[in-house]
Image (cartoon, helix red, strand yellow):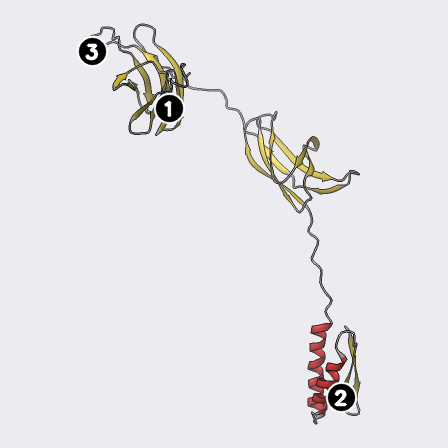
Amino acid sequence: MHGGCIIDNSNREIVMLINYKSINQSIIHSIIQPFIHSITQPFLRSVVLFLFLSMTILLFGCKQTTEPKLEPELKLELEDVSCTEAWINLRITNLQLPANVTLYKNSEAQNNILCYGDTLLYVDSLLPNQTYKFKSIVQSSNQQIITSSNELTVTTMDTTSHDFTWQSWEFGQHSSSTLYDVAIIDENNIWAVGKIYMLDSLGRPDPNAYNAVHWDGTKWELLRIPYQYNGKNYYTALRAIYAFNQNDIWFGIASIIHWNGVVYKSIDTSPFFPALIN
């Protein structure tokens, strides 16, 4: 506080001692003192002086505060984990970049990472159904720890018991039926492509092969997927298949066939890619 006060019991007045480095002396003499002397009642004068003193403390007696220092921080968060791999997010706050971060696994240093910000760490060569503890630290040039992260516990997934129940299907009743590729969208939507020769309704070999077979969760359906060229349909053996989803499936031959969920569309790629698409 830049001032003090003395109580004079003889006239019950408060005389203020003010540090003139904080308050302009001319303001006190020209405004404050004439106003105070104009008050005739001692008690009321004391009240006014008390209020003035309080305002003086609030306006001039408070020390300037400084912003708190922001501490550097590292944080590890698990993104994903498999049987032998883990993906860990490293969050960096209030740290001078780039920062040299050391990752520890079960208290053993694994590698140093030069980080320019938040980073996704990839850890491999883990064992199935095992628990690991990860931690990261940043050290100064003299090996002093600047900051360290939380300890992250990661448990890898277990392998299966390998007690599978297998089902098998065979396609083709004559000639050299072959499947070249398979696409699994889910357990109720499986495709296989190739050339599949079947018998006709009279039990005789049908020379027109099917080029795809589809599983809907209940049964397999043989299909002839057309490739349109010069206004005609050709049912060539399909060599490859890739499915993004049930309404976005691509088939490869010497060109491309696309299923959009409604129709098959043929795309001729032979002018710039004259080869089989496998």
Q: How many marks?
A: 3
Question: Could you say which quadrant of the image residue 240 lies in?
Answer: top left
Image height of 232 relative to 149, above or below: above
Seen at 49% across and 20% down, the residue is 162
From the viewer's perspective, tell me whether residue 145 is left or right of residue 128.
Answer: right
- Secondary element at tag 3: loop
Between the residue at mark 2 and the residue at mark 3, the CA separation in whole angstroms equals 123 Å
Q: Quadrant of the C terminus?
A: top left
Residue 114's disc is none
Q: Amino acid at mark 3?
A: Ser
Q: Is tag 2's residue or tag 3's residue first in the polypeptide sequence?
A: 2
Three-letter amino acid code at the position of disc 1: Trp
| Structural crowding at the residue carrying mark 1, measured as other residues with C-alpha within 10 Å and reported as few (<14), some (14–19) or many (≥20) | some
2 or 1: mark nearer the eye:
1
**In the displayed structure image, the side of residue 154 where residue 39 appears, left or right:** right
Q: CA distance from mark 1 to mark 3?
A: 31 Å
Q: Residue at label 3?
A: 201
Q: Residues within 10 Å of mark 2 (few under 14, many from 20)?
A: some
Q: Position of 76 compared to 250: left or right? A: right
Q: Which of marks 3 and 1 precedes in the sequence?
A: 3
Q: Position of residue 171 (x, y in %)?
A: 33, 12
Height in image: 53 above or below 130? below
* Labelled disc at residue 250: 1
The x and y percentages for residue 136 are: 67, 37
Find residue 23 and report its horizontal and vertical position in percent: 75, 76
User: In this figure, which residue is indicated by the disc labeled 2?
Assistant: 13
